Image (cartoon, rainbow, N blue to C red):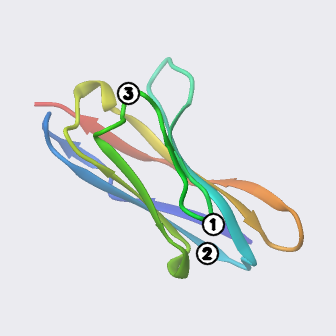
Amino acid sequence: QVQLVESGGGLVQPGGSLRLSCAASGSIVSINAMGWYRQAPGKERELVASITSDSVTRYADSVKGRFTISRDNAKNTVYLQMNSLKPEDTSVYYCNAAIVIIISPRLYWGQGTQVTVSS
């Protein structure tokens, strides 16, 4: 059984910062790519940022220069540092990870954490 547990969401004023964490646990052999997605009410889930096992990163245009994704392979954890937050960043943020438990990787999702940017 593999679980992804997110933390770090909350309410922040425009221009503020938050750091999200997502820790994977269970019978993990290895973790390939990890990523953060978000979904606002009435909208489709969208990719925010992703990072490969050798730390190659990719960002949505809307967050470039403001968000930074990183990972700690020893802790099976991915982070999302969010700076200069805007009201339009308000969403539920989900992490995902391609995790190998036997041979082939399978995609797992966290339960989501709410980020609200408001004055």
Q: Secondary structure at mark 2?
A: strand
Q: Secondary structure at mark 3?
A: loop
Q: Callout 1, which amino acid? A: Gln
Dot 1, crowdedness within 10 Å: few (<14), some or many (≥20)? some
The foreground one among 33 and 109 is 33
Q: Residue at x 79, y 57 (%)?
A: 106
| Alpha carbon distance from label 3 to label 1 | 29 Å
- Residue in view at x 60 percent, y 65 percent: 54
Residue underneath mark 3: 62
Three-letter amino acid code at disc 2?
Ser
Res 87 quadrant in image: top left
Identify residue for label 2. Answer: 25
Residue 51: x, y in percent? 55, 54
Q: Residue at x 36, y 50 (%)?
A: 68
For image coordinates 62% across by 64% down, the residue present is: 53
Q: Which image quarter is the N terminus in?
A: bottom right
50 left or right, relative to 69: right
Question: Do labels 1 and 2 touch, CB within 8 Å?
Answer: yes
Relative placement, left or right, of 93 versus 83 is: right
Of 92 and 15, nearer the camera is 15
Q: Disc 3 or 1, which lies upstream in sequence? A: 1
Give the residue at the far left of this rendering. Answer: 119
* Quadrant of the rendered image containing residue 13: top left
Query: How far apart are labels 1 and 2 at the CA level?
Result: 5 Å
Between 25 and 15, the one lying in front of the other is 15
